[in-house]
Amino acid sequence: MRHADADAGGSANCGDSQGDHSCPGGADTAAAPAGGAPPPHASGPGRDATSVARGPGMRPHIFTLSVPFPTPLEAEIAHGSLAPDAEPHQRVVGKNLAVSGRILVVRWEAEDCRLLRISVINFLDHLSLVVQTMQHFGPPISR
């Protein structure tokens, strides 16, 4: 699998320069991990939704976004504001938010490039609103 990491930016492993947005088997499809075997998936009722929807030989598209904040407290505030937003397509798009110091890290995993793109765009809209609100009210006051 390829991972895209960025500081307040990022890119997904989807699409190519010729405008192919379907992604299956294309040049930008995620590569297999060392050894050539697909990643292991849990089996049975507790397995994740993306492993159920995945066809033979298909690997998910992964997008990781790292958003730096001035302080760890502001990163936690943003996390608290953004985490409650449920993913509309949570059966086919996985999203995980975490805070590491002053960095908010968001990781998506999806089979469908279009749904991944929609999820990222919606998240960026919400992130923009959170950042604008935090800037409007100024830095948090520690108690």
Image (spheres, rainbow, N blue to C red):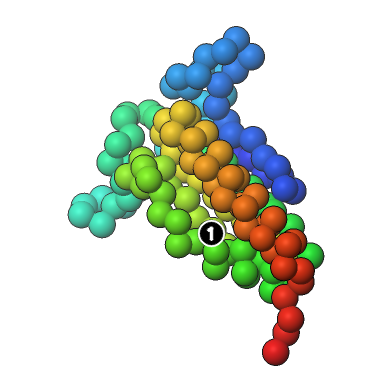
Q: Residues within 10 Å of mark 1 (few under 14, many from 20)?
A: some
Farthest residue to the top: give it: 18
111 in relation to 76, above or below:
above
Please state the total of marks drawn on the protein image: 1
Q: Which residue is at 32% across, 29% downward? A: 56
Farthest residue to the front: give it: 136
Q: Which residue is at 31% across, 30% downward? A: 55
| Image spot of residue 140 (x, y percent) | 72, 75
Residue 8 seen in the figure: yes
Query: Could you tell whether 100 is left or right of 70 in the image?
Result: left
98 in relation to 17, above or below:
below
| Image spot of residue 52 (x, y percent) | 28, 41
In which quadrant of the rendered image does the C terminus lie? bottom right
Query: Could you tell whether 121 is left or right of 6 in the image?
Result: left
Farthest residue to the left: give it: 45
The picture quadrant where one finds residue 69 is bottom right
The picture quadrant where one finds residue 78 is bottom right
Q: Which residue is at 36% across, 42% downward? A: 89
Query: Could you tell whether 116 is left or right of 27 in the image?
Result: left
Pointer 1 residue: 82
The picture quadrant where one finds residue 72 is bottom right
Residue 104 seen in the figure: no
Q: Which residue is at 52% across, 42% downward? A: 122
Farthest residue to the bottom: give it: 143
Residue type highlighted by circle 1: Leu
Element type at mark 1: helix
| Image spot of residue 141 (x, y percent) | 74, 81
| Image spot of residue 77 (x, y percent) | 62, 69
